[in-house]
């Protein structure tokens, strides 16, 4: 199937670069629309699994966030996100990105001191974009989150929450 071929392609030499090209907005206008293939292949699961690791190398975190960002920039794909092993359902998109929500809004000593293995500012900006894409794709009645997310959102400091026009708007 197309989904299996996409998953196999990502693990081949140069495959990740080809998938980046297929997920690019310009390519979507020029050729066959690949978003259904990406969602059917559950291409969001490996990045979500990787982001659950407590310590990641910079390029590993960047690759996982890039793949998720490519998927969530399209509403259909953002709504199809589901936690690993779970089928897409009402509210599943926000449950799927709970790791990103935790990283963005939960403050602990390691994240406050920027200990090795924690996100850089560019990673936090990419995660914020993914979170906003998923929230915007969800219908209002599905936008329920735990209280710690809301209190963390109010207390969020630094990039991207206080930087630039988007930060001021947030």
Image (cartoon, rainbow, N blue to C red):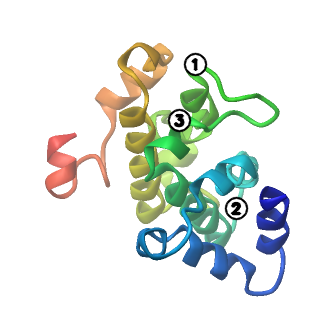
Task: Identify the mark nearer the N-term, 3 or 2.
Answer: 2
Proximity of marks 3 and 2: CB atoms separated by less than 8 Å: no
Q: Residue 103 appears in which quarter of the rendering? A: top right
Q: Nearer the viewer, residue 46 or 58?
A: 46
Residue displayed at 45% across by 35% down? 105
Can residue 53 be seen in this snapshot? no
- Looking at the image, residue 46 sits to the left or right of residue 118; the answer is right
The numbered disc on residue 43 is none
Place of residue 1 in the rendered image (x, y in percent of width and height, measured from the top left): 85, 58
Reading the image, the residue beneath label 1 is 90
Q: Which mark is residue 79?
A: 3
Residue reaching furthest to the bottom:
14
| Residue 61: % across, % down | 62, 63
Residue 13 visible: yes
Label 2 secondary element? loop
- Dot placed on the residue nearer the N-terminal end, 1 or 2: 2
The residue positioned 57% from the left and 67% from the top of the image is: 62
Estimate the spatial distance between the alpha carbons at disc 3 and disc 2, rounded to whole Å. Answer: 27 Å
**Relative horizontal placement of residue 22, taking residue 128 as reference (left or right):** right
Whole-percent x, y for residue 81 in the image: 62, 38
In the rendered structure, the answer to whether residue 92 lies left or right of residue 157 reads: right
Q: In the image, which is nearer the foreground, mark 1 or mark 2?
A: 1
* CB-based contact (under 8 Å), mark 1 and mark 2: no
Element on which disc 1 rests: loop
N-term mark: 1 or 3: 3
102 shown above or below 1: above
Q: Tally the marks.
A: 3
The span from disc 1 to disc 2 (Cα, nearest Å) is: 30 Å
Q: Which residue is mark 2?
A: 56
Which element carries disc 3, helix, strand or loop?
helix
**Residue drawn at 62 percent across, 51 percent down:** 36
């Amino acid at each position: 199937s197309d989904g299996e071929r996409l998953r196999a392609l990502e693990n081949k030499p140069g495959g990740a670069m080809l998938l980046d090209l297929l997920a690019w907005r310009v390519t979507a206008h020029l050729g066959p629309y690949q978003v259904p293939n990406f969602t059917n292949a559950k291409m969001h699961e490996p990045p979500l699994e990787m982001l659950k690791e407590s310590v990641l190398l910079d390029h590993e975190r960047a690759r996982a966030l890039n793949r998720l960002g490519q998927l969530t920039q399209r509403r259909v794909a953002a709504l199809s996100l589901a936690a690993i092993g779970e089928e897409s359902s009402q509210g599943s998109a926000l449950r799927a990105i709970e790791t990103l929500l935790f990283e963005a809004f939960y403050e602990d000593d390691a994240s406050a001191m920027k200990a090795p293995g924690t996100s850089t500012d560019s990673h936090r900006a990419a995660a914020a974009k993914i979170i906003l894409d998923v929230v915007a794709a969800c219908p209002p009645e599905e936008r329920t989150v735990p209280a710690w997310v809301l209190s963390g959102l109010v207390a969020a400091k630094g990039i991207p929450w206080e930087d630039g026009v988007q930060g001021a708007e947030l």
